[in-house]
Amino acid sequence: MERQDPHIIIQPEDIDKQYHTLNLGPTHPATHGIFQNILTMDGEKIIDAEQTIGYIHRAFEKIAERRPYYQIKPLTDRMNYCSSPINNMGWDMTFEKLMGIEVSKKVDYMRVILMELARITDHLVCNSVIGVDSGALTGFVYVFEQREAIYEIYEEMCGARLTTNMGRFGGFERDFNATAINKLRALLKRLPQVLHEFEKLLVRNRIFMDRTINVGGISAERALNYGFTGPNLRAAGVDYDVRVMNPYSSYQDFDFVIPVGQNGDVYDRFCVRQQEMWESIKIIESALENMPQGKPHVDIPHIYLPPKHEVYDKMEALIYHFKIVMGEIDPPKKEIYHAVEGGNGELGFYLVSDGGRSPYRLHFRRPSFIYYQAFPEIIKGSTLSDAILTMSSMNVIAGELDA
Amino acid sequence: MTKDKLYTLLKEKLGDFVELAANDTDLPTCIVDVQHIYQAIALLKDEHGFVFLTDVCGIHYPEQLLPLGVIYHLHNFKTNERIRLKTFVSAESPIVPTLTSLFESANWMERETYDFYGIVFDGHPNLKRILNVEYLDFYPMRKEYKLEDPTREDKDNRFFGR
């Protein structure tokens, strides 16, 4: 005989309808960034979710309408700060497209190396964090040593690590020095071993597979409709990659594969990113091997900053330096859209120039801003712990989301 | 798809409500009347394979008769073509039809445009501010809101902790 309290009468259907609200974020360690999700929960099941974003909105587009072109670059590396060189060079290439400048193969290849290094850091962070959120902290700490090695190469190139502000319009301030080349070669030797071990830890791990397969999946059709790009779209089975569709920076010279997944779930996203890192290593090796000789920049004095020592004792160099930094470049009146394959997908720069010293309008197409809106649909019906995993596998970067 | 091909294609359906963009652009660009922008994009999506909405953003030209604009970037993956469509509205009734029924991705991009330019997207399921605070009573990306001038002298520094 079932015991029942005679004073409380609860029908079974009443229990099902008792939802509660849970605030996930804005500053929860599991969200890896500042965004809030207001979840409506039925027990542990998510019924509905509403996102609030904009906690670190810094008005980059407004600031860009006032700054000279040269001073906009530091804004770009504060968007996706896990792979800031891609943002920096995307902006450099946008400006070069506006001015109609062709850079040499040498610059292209150097950019390719640095952008692929940035892609590796981005994917390393994302994939190891998927591990952390499913309970495997070891891999995270292990691969961060390699991320550190890549940051040391950045340091040799530009002196900075996270917000790099790397390169110049028209090329680089310096070539890879001997230390950078040595570090790069050491990395290319060590990174494959680490990746192998990292994959051994997770890819066929029973617990990891159970936690990630068929979790947070999205179909190719829905993903396209939601504006997915990058690894998240490729995990759903669409082989769209800006590097191949609209090659920039001589990507057409390199032989690489676009990995695609099938189900668009957390596991596929993990595998696509993992495979992309292998392809990136291949691209870097090939670029390093076929690196052309020559100057790492163009010789156009009104675009490319003069060397610093000349600025101190040559009048022309000082004038050009001043004009470039203060925006006396005279760009043409033009409208352009330039896209690069960022860590998260198509990073676009829509630039309207009215011939003035700053852009009339600059809009950043931030990939994670666009695909993060699919999050409620993806997590509906799943459990809270799966939602955390889904979020980290989508690699939503708060800086890029809020601009 | 060339500029002229896009123009003739839209002209066939929409007649005088479409015109070629005058200024120098890198992509084929057309300006479509706001009453027909939904029809134009639906046509391009359903019949010409432009299934991917790359970007939606706003723009403000204060000196124009119709100062506020919305700019759409569309991408056809099969033929790898990108196009750009623009539509302009007046500041008094800045109403543009929403694309959320065609593309889910338009949802937040339109909210962002509303947030910064005050362009109202008719039929949008959840049109509220997205990056700025909800109680903001102006649209900050409009050109009349200047960024602070670092050399201005009319500010009372006591109020800013200096």
Image (tube, coloured by chain):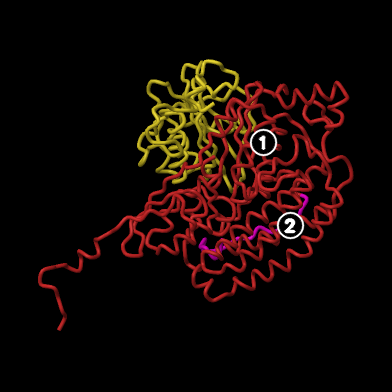
Chain colours: A red, B yellow
Considering every residue shown, the one lying at the far left of the view is A6
Magenta includes A264?
A: yes
Compute the Cα span from label 2 to label 1: 24 Å
| Lateral position of residue A389 relative to residue B78, left or right | left
Tell me the residue that label 2 is attached to: A149
Tell me which residue sits at (78%, 46%) in the image: A157
Circle 1: residue type: Lys
Residue A4: percent from left, percent from top: 14, 75
Q: Residues within 10 Å of mark 2 (few under 14, many from 20)?
A: some
Mark 1 residue element: helix
Residue A195: percent from left, percent from top: 69, 66
Mark 2 residue element: helix
Quarter residue A182 falls in:
bottom right
- Magenta range: A253-269
Tell me which residue sits at (49%, 58%) in the image: A30
Residue A233: percent from left, percent from top: 55, 54
What main secondary structure does the magenta stretch of the protein show?
Answer: loop
The verdict on a common chain for dots 2 and 1 is yes
Compared with A55, A147 (above or below) is below
Magenta includes B57?
A: no
Tell me the residue that label 1 is attached to: A73
Residue A91: percent from left, percent from top: 67, 37
Circle 2: residue type: Ala
Numbered disc 2: what chain? A
Considering every residue shown, the one lying at the far bottom of the view is A1
Tell me which residue sits at (84%, 32%) in the image: A307
